Image (cartoon, rainbow, N blue to C red):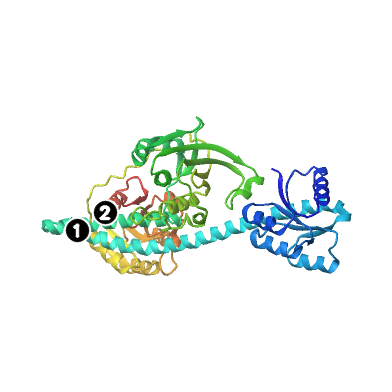
């Protein structure tokens, strides 16, 4: 593209001389000439330029005033003096005030090198500012994510107590009035909605446990197509386009479905009068030279998953905050502000990044970049999560630092016949198991305990006494438990349970674990 230059010069021969000098260099330029203050300042207000060239002495106007106006209207645009009257003292003053250089009219051979240097430095400065802005935004999002993860952790414990006590009442044989039963069900329904919000917060903060396996994004789109058509309504035309080449990534399939669904819902809301929605996948390869496009971009092979709409677009003032949780431009009651936040968190958790192109009144495209993998040799089958509620008489060592959660869990297990030993921390559990004199059959513990002894370390120590000890790790997804060692869990046939969980889920997992059935990592309440 040609370089747009605004040239303030009242002398026509000098205007022509500058134009010919730049043209002879081969530098593609689009030069707008003005001769006075009024036209100059009007163009500064209404047009963008890559470079400003100005004479120093003008009738009724001077170069320093022109420089001040340019810095006010178009800060960052290089400003160059070309003058025959500027003295050394005023030249130095102009450089101090923000001009990038000055060229004497009788020495125009310096003009082209000066212009090229100014343009190069301007591009470098813009790129640096853009990267700094992206870095600040990434740091802000990381901080908000840490906060979201911490809040969700504590909130999950509260929900576990609420849901667990209600379910404990419902599991008993004692009669409950119809009104009381309906109230208890309403409590469970509300807690379920709260748990869903918490999972979205965890997804934003990348604190949600992930069960990664080879996932074909094309299949995710195909399987959800019917649901998506019902979600967007008849006024929006949905088109899916992807190559025959399989688009495999290492991902949690349910999380990928959440990403797609949230992006589609976001596009639907941007097209209240209807429009077109396009979902595509593409395999792309980035070289080292492409990494400047985004702070998380890196060389390698990726699957680009794009959702494009013809909606209202996103206004520039909203762009810096669109991925923040609870930030929404929708009317009250029309959105929680967690949809795009969840997309951002899930994609980051999968070592990817999100890019956005939008134009108000034209539409928006979200591009998700995820590391590509080779297609697996065989398909993996999901484990059945069905569980029958049976109790037992085995001894269970329960490690939980939250008193309310610990009390609830003990009551639930004892209701179904289990013998429960309680501990508040890893060291407490170790001492308790040593004093008890009897080996426990199952350890139910958090991944991280208050005294620094992690759940896996406690399990390893206990297994030296009881090699066949069964273990279930439970987490409310605090920052410390984000990247739990799934290899460790698989190696030892251990299980993982995410808070908040239904009582039936916990009881079913305990029974299956004690019975030695195939493990299931990543269970959670639904």
* The N terminus, quarter of image: top right
Q: Position of residue 377 (x, y in %)?
A: 48, 33
Q: Quadrant of residue 95?
A: bottom right
Helix, strand or loop at mark 1:
helix
Q: Would you say 7 lies left or right of 414 here?
A: right
Q: Distance of mark 1 from mark 2, alpha carbons?
A: 20 Å
Q: Quadrant of residue 135?
A: bottom right
The disc label shown at residue 249, or none: none
Task: State the residue at coordinates (85%, 59%).
Answer: 84
- The secondary element bearing badge 2 is classed as helix
Residue designated by label 2: 507
Sort mark 1 into few (<14), some (14-19) or many (20+) by Cα contacts within 10 Å: some
Q: Residue furthest right?
A: 106
Q: Which residue is mark 1?
A: 184
Nearer the N terminus, badge 1 or badge 2?
Answer: 1
Name the spot of residue 207 as percent of width and height, x first: 43, 57
Front residue of 510/290: it is 290
Extreme-front residue of the structure: 60
User: Is residue 294 shown above or below 183?
Assistant: above
Q: Position of residue 523 (x, y in %)?
A: 35, 50
Name, please, the residue furthest toward the top.
244
Q: Residue at x 78, y 68 (%)?
A: 93
Mark 2 Cα-neighbour bin, 10 Å: few <14, some 14–19, many ≥20: many
Q: Is residue 209 above or below residue 429?
A: above
**Which of the 4 image quadrants contains residue 406?**
bottom left
Q: Look at discs 1 and 2 and give the one toward the viewer.
A: 1
Q: Please determine whether, in this image, residue 483 is positioned above or below residue 376.
A: below
Count the numbered circles shown: 2
Q: Is residue 469 visible?
A: no
Residue 229 is at least partly visible in this image: yes
């Amino acid at each position: 593209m040609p370089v747009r230059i605004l040239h303030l010069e009242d002398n026509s021969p000098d205007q022509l001389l500058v134009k010919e000098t730049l043209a002879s260099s081969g530098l593609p330029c689009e030069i707008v000439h003005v001769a006075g203050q009024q036209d100059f300042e009007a163009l500064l207000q209404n047009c963008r330029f890559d470079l400003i060239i100005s004479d120093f002495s003008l009738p009724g106007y001077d170069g320093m005033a022109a420089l001040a106006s340019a810095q006010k209207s178009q800060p960052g645009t290089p400003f160059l003096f070309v003058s025959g009257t500027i003295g050394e003292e005023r030249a130095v003053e102009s450089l101090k005030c923000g001009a990038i250089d000055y060229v004497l009219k009788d020495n125009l051979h310096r003009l082209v090198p000066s212009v090229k240097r100014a343009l190069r430095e301007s591009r470098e400065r813009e790129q640096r500012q853009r990267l700094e802005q992206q870095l600040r935004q990434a740091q802000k999002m990381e901080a908000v994510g840490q906060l979201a993860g911490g809040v969700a952790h504590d909130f999950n414990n509260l929900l576990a107590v609420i849901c667990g006590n209600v379910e404990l009442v419902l599991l008993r044989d004692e009669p409950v009035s119809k009104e009381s039963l309906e109230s208890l069900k309403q409590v469970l329904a509300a807690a379920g909605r709260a748990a869903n919000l918490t999972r979205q917060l965890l997804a934003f903060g990348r604190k949600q446990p992930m069960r990664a396996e080879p996932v074909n994004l094309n299949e995710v789109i195909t399987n959800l197509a019917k649901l998506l058509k019902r979600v967007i309504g008849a006024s929006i035309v949905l088109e899916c386009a992807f190559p025959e080449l399989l688009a495999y990534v290492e991902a949690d399939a349910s999380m990928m479905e959440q990403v797609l669904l949230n992006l589609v819902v976001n596009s639907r809301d941007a097209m209240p009068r209807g429009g077109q929605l396009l979902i595509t996948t593409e395999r792309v390869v980035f070289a080292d030279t492409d990494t400047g496009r985004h702070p998380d971009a890196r060389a390698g092979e990726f699957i680009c998953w794009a959702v494009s709409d013809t909606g209202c677009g996103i206004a520039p003032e909203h762009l810096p905050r669109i991925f923040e949780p609870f930030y929404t431009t929708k009317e009250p009651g029309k959105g929680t502000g967690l949809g795009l936040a969840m997309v951002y968190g899930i994609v980051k958790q999968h070592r990817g990044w999100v890019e956005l192109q939008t134009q108000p009144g034209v539409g928006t495209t979200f591009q998700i970049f995820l590391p590509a993998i080779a297609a697996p040799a065989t398909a993996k089958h999901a484990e059945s999560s069905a569980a029958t509620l049976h109790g037992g008489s085995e001894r269970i060592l329960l490690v939980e630092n939250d008193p309310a959660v610990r009390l609830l869990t003990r009551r639930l297990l004892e209701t179904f016949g289990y013998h429960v030993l309680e501990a508040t921390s890893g060291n407490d559990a170790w001492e308790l198991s040593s004093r008890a004199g009897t080996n426990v059959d199952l350890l139910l513990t958090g991944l991280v305990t208050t005294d620094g002894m992690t759940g896996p370390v406690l399990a390893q120590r206990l297994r030296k006494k009881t090699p066949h000890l069964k273990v279930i790790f439970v987490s409310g997804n605090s920052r410390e438990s984000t990247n739990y060692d799934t290899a460790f869990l698989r190696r030892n046939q251990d299980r993982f349970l995410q808070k908040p969980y239904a009582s039936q889920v916990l009881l079913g997992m305990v029974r299956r674990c004690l019975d030695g059935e195939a493990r299931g990592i990543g269970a959670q309440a639904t």
